[in-house]
Amino acid sequence: MYAAISDTQVLTLIPACQRGDAGAVEGLYELYADRIYHYVLARTGDVDAAEDLTAEVFLRVIQHVHRFKLDTARPSSSVSAWLYRIAANLVADYHRVRQRRPTVSIEEDALLISAAPDPSQQAERRDVLERLSGALEKLTEDQRLVVVCKFSEGMSNAQAAACLGKTEGAIEALQHRALRTLCRLLGAR
Amino acid sequence: MNEKRLAGILKRCLDEIAAGEAAEACLAQYPEYAAELRPLLAMAGELGMLSQYHVSDAARLHAKVQLRRAEAARRDQRASSQGWLRLGSFLTPRAAAGLAAILLCVLLTVGTVAASGPGDLTYGLRIAAERIPTRLSPDAETRARAELRIASRRLADLDRTMRGHAQEIDERTVSALLVSVGAAAEIATSLSEPERTEIAARITEQAAQLGQLRQSAHRTQQAEALQAAFGQAYRAAERAGAGPISPTPQPAGPLHEPTRSPTATPHSTLTPERTPFPSPSATATASPTPAPSATPSHVAPGDTGRQQTTTPQARLTATAGRNTPQATPVGPGPMATSPGPDPAATSPGPKPTVTAPGPGPVATSPGPDPAATSPGPGPTSPDPGSGSPPGHSPGPRG
């Protein structure tokens, strides 16, 4: 389920990106797009916005990769942390803009739902996503990242620890607290 | 402690569920925690729905197109500013500070040089720097005009010096002026007639301005220097094709344009009262009478050096004294229009101004040929004071 990203891949791709190799940025996108997408989706609850923001993350990578200092001791997790940080900033901007002006009116929303293959199912999924993302916004960033790594990416605690640069014990505790908070916020089922 | 244990049990249950076990089987293993574990496992299952979402193929394709475009734009941007980026990436903060200091020094130096004037240390640098563009133009006319522009600047420098009542003229100003005027004249010879005439007229004009400045000289040295420059500038105008000119500077008023009229009658052109350089022995060195053998069209006034070497009359005058006009009149020479008294004849008086000679070839000149009659009161000079009344003849000054 979860395809681990090796340090070797990162050590090859990042310097190539820094040299301006377009193929390398695409390679980085292929490696990290779903991971970033899940994170953004978990925080926005909007599939389309998640796709757009994911692409935007990698556009930011192109802009700033020449200043990125790769931690050669833990290359993969340092890149993950960097990408999640960019994504977090973009999501924060997204929420800020959305608070100022709602993007979709009720009529437009209805039209979008009716255009989907199974409108009622789509609406239900959308509702779940929105509830989850709303609750996830109440978590700490570490808890959110653990939730995404564990339940969106299907990582083991060891993999999540490697990805996030934490110990397995920390991941275990963060996971527990995150689930408990979410249960409290969303209600037990 | 209990929380830590619960976290451990939760982890084990989630691992088992991920491995394919049922949630109920896991809860059965920990019945004392089942109540707490159940909602947590349910929530984990609900969160698992996120993993069903993936970036769509269309979104991937769109994103890759965007990435390629952005990368290309960045590459273009980098190519345009590559030099600066490379410099910036290699510069340490100390090197950058050094570079900034050097730049500041250069800017300050350039500013100082640009603002310098006669007498300043950096004035020579300014003169040299200003001449650089004149050598860059491939077009002769443009070069000549550039030289004239620079000559005008030097004239302005001289004017400032004189107005400032400076004790001495910066020799560099005069030299630079003559270099520019000479260069313009030289270039003008290769130009077509209208352009050459125009350049020559402008040189003449600048020479006239020099004459004007000479008149306002406060000190002998200044006047001599300007006198010499005045003569050279007129010779340059001649070389450029100005023809005979009456370069009489007006004693007052704005700088005038010299009359390019060969028939001009330059009476009273001697202006000794305005040229107070003493010349006790000036008769030997500063006779304004050019040799008849000199260029008959026009002799630049004040060119004492040339006169010394080319006018036997002058030498005669010098040795003969005021009452011994030894020279035989040779007819109206180039200085035939010079109406004033021969300065050689009035040795204790001021050296006659260099403007004394009028247009050479004028046969109708009212005055006697000073070359022939250099000692004013000589037999061929019945009215030596016709151009300049004796009473106006200044005594030595300065």
Image (spheres, coloured by chain):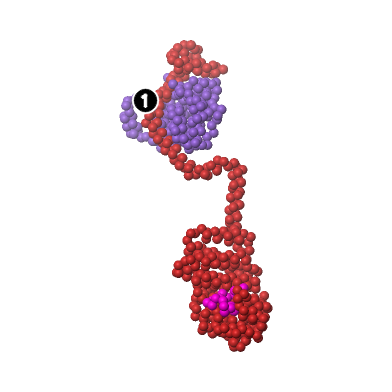
Chain colours: A purple, B red
State the residue in front, B232 or B62: B232
> What is the crowding at mark 1: few (fewer than 14 residues within 10 Å), some, or many (at least 20)?
few
State the residue in front, B236 or B4: B236
Position of residue B368 relative to residue B189, above or below, is below
Residue tagged 1: A124
| Picture quarter with the N terminus of chain B | top right
User: Which range of residues does the magenta coloring cover?
Assistant: B289-305
Q: Position of residue A43 (x, y in %)?
A: 45, 29
Residue found 47% across the figure and 22% down from its top: A155
Q: Amino acid at mark 1?
A: Glu
State the residue in front, A80 or A170: A80
A45 relative to B322 in the view: left or right: left
State which chain disc 1 sits on: A
Position of residue B340 relative to residue B54, above or below, is below
Q: Magenta region's main secondary structure? A: loop
Residue found 46% across the figure and 35% down from its top: A21
Q: Is residue B295 magenta?
A: yes
Residue found 45% across the figure and 67% down from its top: B192
Q: Position of residue A70 (x, y in %)?
A: 54, 32
